[in-house]
Amino acid sequence: IGDFDSTPCSGEHVEHTAQVGRFRIKSYSMKNENVVRIRFSV
């Protein structure tokens, strides 16, 4: 997505996206015109 960093990082990393399994977007909000905060659970 251009220069946009779409990788949420909370310190845990996987080798393959298949290891993530299901996840749920709990909420999102616009912090400003350049920042979207996304809360999710796995």
Image: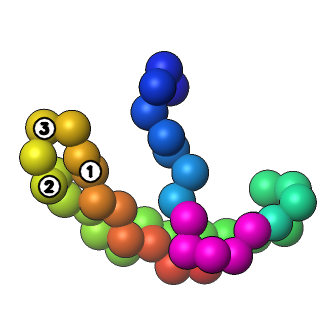
**Residue 3, image x and y in percent?**
46, 25
Residue visible at 79% across and 56% down in the picture: 17
Neighbor class of circle 1 (other Cα within 10 Å; few <14, some 14-19, many 20+) is few
What amino acid is at disc 1? Val
Q: Quadrant of the C terminus?
A: bottom right
SS at mark 3 in the image: loop
Badges 2 and 1: C-beta atoms under 8 Å apart? yes
What amino acid is at disc 2? Lys
Neighbor class of circle 2 (other Cα within 10 Å; few <14, some 14-19, many 20+) is few
- Residue 11 lies in quadrant: bottom right
Q: CA distance from mark 3 to mark 1?
A: 8 Å
Q: Which residue position holds label 1?
A: 36
Q: Which residue position holds label 3?
A: 33
Q: CA distance from mark 2 to mark 1?
A: 6 Å
Outermost residue to the right: 15
Q: Which residues are magenta?
A: 9-13
Report the disc number at residue 31: 2
Q: CA distance from mark 2 to mark 3?
A: 7 Å
SS at mark 2 in the image: strand
What amino acid is at disc 3? Glu
Outermost residue to the left: 32
Q: How many marks?
A: 3
Residue visible at 37% across and 71% down in the picture: 39
- The answer to whether residue 12 is magenta is yes
